[in-house]
Image: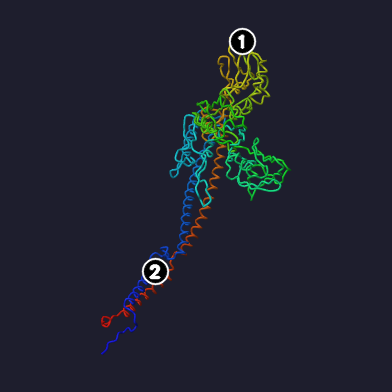
Amino acid sequence: MAILPTQLARVSNLLRTNSAQGQIALTHRKLLQVQNELTTGKRINVGSDDPGDAAIVQQLQKSLELRQSFLTNLNRAKNHLSEVDSTLGDLNDLIQRAQEIASANVGSDVPPEQRAGAAAVVESIYGEALTLANKQFEGVYLFAGDRSTDAPFVAGPGGVRFVGSESVLQNAFDESTDLPFMVNGADVFGALSTRVTGSVDLTPQLTASTRISELRGATGAGVQLGTIQIGNGTTTALVDLSHADNVQDVANAISAAGLGNISASISGDHLVIGTSGADNITVTDVGGGTTAASLGVVQASGAGPGVAVTGAGLQPQVDLLTPLSALKNGAGIDTTHGLVITNGQNTATISLAGANTVQDLLNRINASSVHVQAQVNAAGTGIDILNPIQGTQMTIGENGGTTAADLGVRSYGPATPLSELNGGKGVATAASGPDFQVTRSDGTSFSVSVAGAQTVQDVINQINTAAGGTGVTASFATTGNGVVLTDTAGGPGTLTVTAQNSSRAAADLGFDQPAAGNVIAGKDTDPVEAQGLFANLAKLRDALNANDQSAITAAAEGLKGDADRMINVRGRTGAQVQELQRRQDSLAGQKIATQAMISQLQDADYATTITKFTTLQTALQATLMTAAKTMNLSLLNFLG
């Protein structure tokens, strides 16, 4: 009997086999993907799982990592400032203890022994304050600024020297915000409050090579270069000044615009835009820019044919590359003699031989043995000299010329008010009658009253008037500082100054010095007194040891200023901590929202995934059973 095959379709075994294997492999692959979702809990494990959502997840993941780095920065900054706040609290406690000691020792009934014992306690407070000033947190000195790896306060024979930085470290707390997470140690301890502020305007001369970055501009806010529009009454032209480096570049660009006969030039401290023809010149800013305004040349309506536009002063600033010869509008300074700086027991003569720029000047001063700090002031109009050593007195005088006066940094001079002398105590004069007697070398003498004198020069004039122009001449020192009495009588005796009527004027003016030859060189009675916490603690200690009630009171007043400054700094620190906490809370919320979005896109829905898993298992089983049936071979498959 005939045997018929069960499969009548004319399909080759190879095709049926490949089809079945392909279907099984596809189901296996889908099943493996679902098993991965169940194992990892994520719908997207590789980009090919869902390329579109995978790209979004990747971007969100980057945003999440960035926010996490910001959160880390905020947390560290908050911890740092919290440690600063705690340290400031400890310092405030020390100041209060010192103030209490001062208050307890100003009475006339306090014996010297008690004050000496209190001085020892103040010395201990001094040491504790120095320890707190050099406190570290997580390997960083709290008050060192951006020199955070070195102790900011160094104790020496003259006092405590600040060697940290006023520039504090910053960190990124979001995509567009960098904020400081430190406080200025010099501000906390008053470390650089002792200074000579330059009293002379050193604004340099405007030249063709003056750089745009050196200008305060007509508005005082600098010069922002961009495009300006210039007209000649009939047509206009746009002039791009964004590539100008110096003032001559600006003038050249305007002249090269080719607009009629208009050209620009430099005159004095300003620009002049003129014409050799009948151009009616207008100058305006473009698109909300401020270039013309900052250059001081805005002319919205022409002033008439041939009338030039005269710009406002461009106010050049003093910067490190400014030539010394350009200072004071080109008058320059005395670079031949230099200046003499004394700080505590150290004195240095600063030579400016070979110095050409402001940077050279600052380097000469800052590299000297007196450890002062010279810098251009914030306004860019002068030089300040700071004393970073609390506990010393600083004086700045001439070296035979006018260098210090030219720079405006002479700490004591003829124009100094008498009220500033002796730490602000002024000059104590007699209730009535003359204040002191000057005896010439020939034995003759004259009396001087300084009543009514307002300045040191007034005293010099009164001495010379009382001397009658013979025998003794008063002048101000050409080297160092002080009033100098010179005897020209030529007698065998010695020039002397003697107090009269219980007046302290002679001593307060520095005349309590022995004559050297025929000269009494009055001492500098207007040194720049050291300020700051360590200086005031040292003053209190020394006043207690000296049993000096008035000095104790003065030191207590200084400590009150330190306490007020500490409170202000601590208040700002607390506000910073609160701001950082607010940012931290905000970023934490953003992080949670981003994580939720990633979860929505990436995480698997277990109910759906389990259903798919079950369906695929059933499909695989059915496919295998179907393949087994359809690929069941008979003997006829092998008959030819």
Residue 179: x, y in percent? Answer: 52, 47
**Residue drawn 58% across and 42% down?**
244
Q: Residues within 10 Å of mark 1 (few under 14, many from 20)?
A: some
Q: How crowded is mark 2: few (under 14 residues within 10 Å), some or many (20 or more)?
A: many
Which amino acid is tagged 2? Answer: Val
Which residue matches tag 1?
A: 442
Residue 440: x, y in percent? Answer: 62, 13
Q: Mark 2–mark 1 contact, CB under 8 Å?
A: no
- Count up the numbered dots: 2
Placement of the N terminus among the 4 image quadrants = bottom left
Q: What element carries label 2?
A: helix
Residue 163: x, y in percent? Answer: 48, 36
Q: Is mark 1 on a helix, strand or loop?
A: loop
Within the image, what quadrant is residue 42 found in?
A: bottom left
Q: Vertical placement of 479 versus 144: above or below?
A: above
Q: Which numbered tag is attached to residue 34?
A: 2
Query: Between marks 2 and 1, how big is the CA–CA gap?
Result: 118 Å
Which amino acid is tagged 1? Answer: Asp
Which residue is the extreme one toward the bottom?
A: 1
Within the image, what quadrant is residue 466 found in?
A: top right
Q: Earlier in the sequence, mark 2 or mark 1?
A: 2
Residue 636: x, y in percent? Answer: 27, 83
Does residue 615 appear left or right of residue 305 in this picture?
left
Placement of the C terminus among the 4 image quadrants = bottom left
